[in-house]
Amino acid sequence: MTPLHVPETPAEYRYNRAHSATHSVMEKTLQTLCSRFRCLDGSKGALQYSPEKSSHIILACCVLHNISLEHGMDVWSSPVTGPIEQPPEGEYEQMESLDLEADRMRQELMLTHFS
């Protein structure tokens, strides 16, 4: 899902606000996981496994991270602070050029949950 470059309706504005909040949470979560589990740091560009195996590795890291937090072992997971970079202006144009099915799904989501 991508934000709308030029929201026009109240539902579109609410969608963009929810998207931004969710994106920020996900960004911080991924930064924390990558700092704790070096196998996720992306130094080679991506996990060198199939998408199915990669998803299992990521899930295992999430479970281990939650277990460590429950046991007070959050020493390695200090959050990375600082401003979150916004995509360059040209990237919005690429986001808006989604295929019709993705655009239809986004519209349905906004109507169902943000109107």
Image: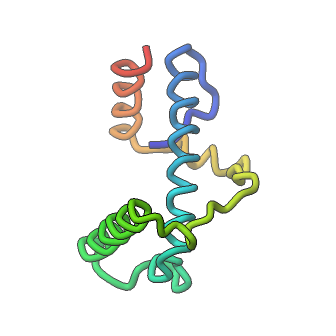
Residue 59, horizontal then vertical, whole percent:
31, 66
Q: Residue furthest front?
A: 71
Name the residue at 39% across, 60% down: 70
Left or right: where 40 falls relative to 10: left
Q: From the viewer's perspective, is 30 left or right of 102?
A: right
Q: Nearer the viewer, residue 48 or 57?
A: 57
Taking 43 as reference, is 1 above or below it?
A: above
Q: Quadrant of the N terminus?
A: top left
The x, y position of residue 33, in whole percent, is 49, 67
Frontmost residue, 50 versus 33: 33
User: Residue visible at 52% across and 78% down?
Assistant: 42
At which x and y percent is residue 14? 53, 22
Q: Identify which residue is drawn at 54% across, 40% down.
A: 96
- Count of numbered circles in the view: 0
Give the image location of residue 35, x and y in percent: 56, 73
Position of the C terminus by quadrant: top left
* Residue plotted at (62% across, 44% down): 93
**Quadrant of the image occupied by residue 57:** bottom left
- Name which quarter of the figure residue 10 lies in: top right
